[in-house]
Amino acid sequence: MKALFVKSSVQLSQLPSLEIPEFAFIGRSNVGKSSLINMITAVKGLAKTSGSPGKTQTINHFIINEKWHLVDLPGYGFAKVSQATRAEWEALMKSYFLNRKQLVNTFSLIDIRLEPQKKDLDFIEFLGVNGIPFSIVFTKSDKLTPNQVRQKVNAYSTKLLEFWEELPPIFVTSATDRTGKEELIKYINELL
């Protein structure tokens, strides 16, 4: 897979104008988004990883195989930024999702070790209510046993079915042991 950094944007007017399909990756701060992006593209350090939450603070576009954009979005949650900055990010993200015609799918990343979090559920609801195609990507599956992974996915699915008629595509991944890489790439190729 050929992956090249295109640009970072802090407002919609700065986004690449190229009309090619986009796949967005987003999740709570520290969900392992950058590690997952690096695993999928097999380019070490393509997305900057950090031990402190909130490393990604811009909309970052990468062109993949000269055919589509991988979009690395700022995380939501407990990044150490001011309320004003957080509000700006949220407004920017909302505008991106509601207005970006090139967006084919949003991968909503969730740490599989956690119980369903309100912020994740609210974000998924926002996507669904606005008809924005999305998939759920559980991260850090290597931290649990296969049985625990199954239980967590089932519990999350049950929670979602309280509000949804059907579930979106669900992927279980680990950047550490490369779980889910082939499935994600296959799904992206199918959508393309």
Image (cartoon, grey):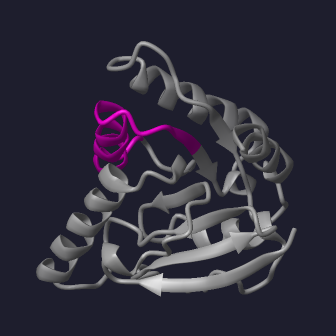
**Count of residue discs:** 0
Q: Is residue 107 visible?
A: no
Per the image, is 106 magenta?
no
Query: 79 or 64: which is nearer to us?
Result: 64
Q: Position of residue 140 (x, y in %)?
A: 66, 57
Per the image, is 132 magenta?
yes
Which residue is located at x 57 percent, y 48 percent? Answer: 112
Task: Specify whether 49 is left or right of 43.
Answer: left
Q: Is residue 136 visible?
A: yes
Quarter occupied by the N terminus: bottom right
Task: Specify whether 169 is left or right of 146.
Answer: left
Q: Position of residue 164 (x, y in %)?
A: 38, 19
Task: Specify whether 128 is left or right of 156.
Answer: left
Looking at the image, residue 132 lies above or below residue 168: below
Query: 23 or 118: which is nearer to us?
Result: 23
Task: Specify whether 65 is left or right of 14.
Answer: right
The part of the image, by quadrant, that contains residue 192 is top right
Query: 102 or 128: which is nearer to us?
Result: 102
Q: Position of residue 152 (x, y in %)?
A: 57, 35
Which residue is located at x 68 percent, y 68 percent? Answer: 37
Q: Residue furthest top?
A: 165
Looking at the image, residue 171 lies above or below residue 69: above
Q: Position of residue 44 (x, y in %)?
A: 79, 83
Which residue is located at x 20 percent, y 65 percent? Answer: 91
Which residue is located at x 31 percent, y 72 percent? Answer: 78
Range of residues picked out in magenta = 116-136
